[in-house]
Amino acid sequence: MLSAGLGVGGLVEPPAIAQTELAQTVETEQRPILFRTKRYVVEIIWRRGQPLMSVSNNGFRVIVNAPARILSARGINDQWTTYTANSGDYTAIVRVGAGGERMIEVSQVGQRIVQEYATTALQQQPDRPAPLQQDATLLSFQTGEYAVRVYRQKNRLYMNLYNQSKGVTELKQVPVVRVESSAGTTYRYDGKATVQVREDYRGQRVLLILQNNQIQYRGDGY
C-alpha cells in the first residue's frame, strides 16, 4: 500500500489544491487586461511571459509597453492581483479583483495623484493590443468670459478659444505644446499673446492670457 501523498517510486505528489492554484495563476497571468476609468485607459498584454503595461490619460500615453511586475498580496485576505510599472516620473499600480473588479493608482515622483476604478471593461483579442484613442478632447471647460478646448488630432495637439462675452472665436485649431510638471499639466500657445491652459492633479483648471509676460486675463474653469 502506498502512503498518503506518495506516488510510484516514493515520489511526493503535489496536493491537488496546489495544482489548481498554479493553473489559475498561469491562466490569470496570460490573459490580456484592458479597461477604462474616468480619465485613463489601461492595457496589460503579455510578450514571451512578460507583462507589458500601457496607460493613456485622456488620450495621451504616459506609459507605453513598460515591463510590469506582479506584486505580492497585500495581506492574507487580499484576493486581488497587483501589477506595477514605471515610466519617467510616473508609477502605475493596476489591481484586478477576483470578481473582475479593476482599478488603477497613479503616482508621480512618489506621490499618489489619483486612484480610479474601472467604468468600462473593453474587449480585446489575445495578443492584439486595442488601439488607444488618437483623436480626443483632452480639456474642455468654461470661465467667466471664455470657453476653451484642447484636443488631439492626428497625433498633434490643438486649442480653440471662444470669447463668450464678445461672441468671437479668438483662436481656432492653433498648435499647442504640452508641459508636465509636479504641479500638473500646462498646454501653451505662443502668438500675439501667450495662452496657457493648466490643470492640476486635483482636476482644478485655469486659463491664463499673457502679453509681454504680464497677465491680461486669469479665469478659473468650471
Image: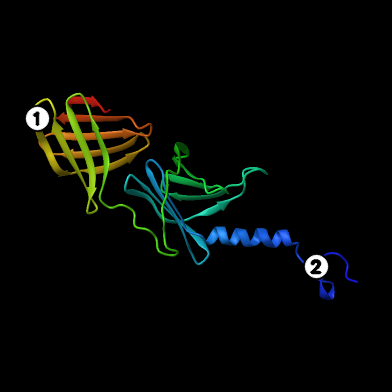
**Residue 134 relative to residue 36: left or right:** left
The numbered dot on residue 27 is: none
The secondary structure type at the circle numbered 1 is loop
Task: Please give the residue where the numbered disc 1 appears in the rendered image.
Answer: 167
Task: Please give the residue where the numbered disc 2 appears in the rendered image.
Answer: 12
**Residue 150 relative to residue 38: left or right:** left
Amino acid under label 2? Val
- Of label 1 and label 2, which has the lower sequence position? 2
Q: Quadrant of residue 26?
A: bottom right
Q: Quadrant of residue 208?
A: top left
Measured as percent of width and height from the top left, residue 59 is found at: 31, 48
**Residue 78 relative to residue 160: left or right:** right
For the N terminus, give its image quadrant.
bottom right
Image position of 220 with respect to 31: above or below: above
Measured as percent of width and height from the top left, residue 78 is found at: 62, 44
Q: Quadrant of residue 200?
A: top left
Measured as percent of width and height from the top left, residue 140 is found at: 25, 36
Image position of 108 with respect to 29: above or below: above
**Could you give the CA–CA distance between mark 1 and mark 2, rounded to whole angstroms?**
81 Å
Q: Is residue 213 visible?
A: no
Neighbourhood count class around disc 2 (C-alpha, 10 Å): few under 14, some 14–19, many 20 upward: few
Image position of 49 with respect to 109: above or below: below
Q: How many marks?
A: 2
Measured as percent of width and height from the top left, residue 201 is found at: 37, 34
For the C terminus, give its image quadrant.
top left
Q: Residue at x 47, y 58 (%)?
A: 32
Q: Is residue 147 visible?
A: yes
Q: Residue at x 84, y 72 (%)?
A: 10
Neighbourhood count class around disc 1 (C-alpha, 10 Å): few under 14, some 14–19, many 20 upward: few
